[in-house]
Amino acid sequence: MSNEARVAEERAILVGLDLKSRSHRGSNQRGSTDPSANDVEESLDEMKSLAGTAGAHVEETIVQARQAPDSATLIGSGKLEELRRLVTFHDAHMVLFDAELTPTQLRNLERALDCKILDRTQLILDIFARRARTREGQLQVELAQLNYLLPRLAGRGTEMTRQGGGIGTRGPGETQLETDRRGIYRRIKKLNDQLESVRGGRGTQRRQRQSVPLATVALVGYTNAGKSTLFNRLTGAEVVADARMFATLDPTVRHLTLPSRRKVLASDTVGFIRNLPTTLVKAFRATLEEVTEAAVLLHVVDASSPSAPQHTARVFEVLADIGADQTQQILVLNKMDQMESAASDTESLAQRIQSLAQRIMGEVKAGARTEAVPVSARTGAGFDTLLQAIDNALPLDPVSHQRFVIPAGEGSLIHLLHERAKVLSSQYRDDVCELEAEVPESVKRRLAGYLVE
């Protein structure tokens, strides 16, 4: 990274909390395989990625092991003193906490450290405020920010006038939060009303789509699993595909043609993350309704990540929260090209894929409604299999094998069959055209008068 880029970044100290009983502390030594220690490390790595996405550079990371969080400062007085020295040494702009701070903890930490304090929820909200492009997304982010900040107004006083800019200050602005609590409640009510209007509009659009047999396939998955790259290759769209977290915030919908010639709508959605703030899940329910209404979910998994089973389980938890856990899913094991380059002589790629799929299924306790398809969104490998799996999984507008005899002069009907069905053979005899095709039910009904039993 260049010196200029480093100067533009805000310097941060990252703080993690490792909650464990005293009886387990002795096992958490170097080389230990303690699952809780691994979980804390992965969560901190994720926070570093979030910080980088927001425009901060983590200068140093500290972890406090405790039986329970300290009610006043989360980490206790001893660790707080160490943290104060680190802030001074690095001349840090902020301290990031990989936890959700209570209003009391937030106030005490700001007074003790005399710098900006952000917890996990605030950092994610800041990224969302930067990434929201549509009016709906901006409304959702503002609602989440106001709901988060409202209980933290008490006692903040003039501290709420932080006008210096930077991470944690984007969005609706904090000057109104110090003036009138009732004004905040009125704003929240107005935002809820506007989002209800959005939901009504989405409901109208959904009913219009349902008036014709056009199913929706929604892409879901952990953030940075490759959903947008997969979506672009499937549909030819140009959605931003970025290694940074939450590169895609506002949903995008495009048409997709399956091998059976059926057309479906493919929807790209925001990536999930561990400990996704409940305020965000509630605020983005209007967007997530597209997931709950989908006929099939493409659950994209970064197969090259050692934490793939755990990431998949996190996504299943969010899907359960929004009532979409019973929707049929296809586990898309993405980034097969990276797995192939890392495959050893003793274990073939096929064996690694099978082992990964079994571990994921065991982690999420997935049922018979879930199957796994390995692909590479970057190279396109496995896409034929994936499209066929989507075709087989769709319950809407089922496909059947049929024969038709259509007058040769009815060119529009013959064209319809070629466009909307998979024509297996066609032959002209005299003044008619005989066709054999795999045809969706909707097309079959339109051509019922030309069917040959």
Image (cartoon, rainbow, N blue to C red):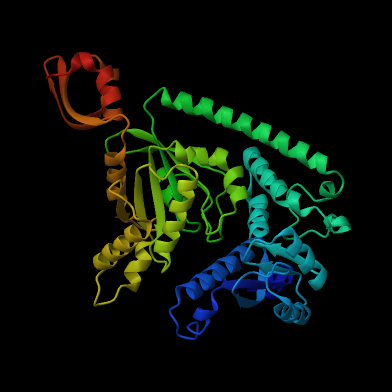
Quadrant occupied by the N terminus: bottom right
Q: Is residue 230 left or right of residue 383?
A: right
The C terminus: image quadrant? top left
Q: Is residue 376 visible?
A: yes
Q: Quadrant of residue 72?
A: bottom right
- Total marks shown come to 0
Image spot of residue 137 (x, y percent): 62, 42
> Residue 142 placed where, x, y %?
70, 45
Q: Looking at the image, which residue is at 55% across and 50% down? A: 248
Whether 71 is drawn above or below 417: the answer is: below
Of the pair 333 and 46, the residue shown nearer to us: 46
Q: Quadrant of residue 57?
A: bottom right
Q: Position of residue 369 (x, y in %)?
A: 30, 46
Q: Residue at x 65, y 72 (%)?
A: 15
Look at the picture and state if 186 lies above or below 450.
Answer: below
Q: Residue at x 38, y 61 (%)?
A: 335
Q: Position of residue 407 (x, y in %)?
A: 19, 14
Q: Nearer the viewer, residue 311 or 153?
A: 153
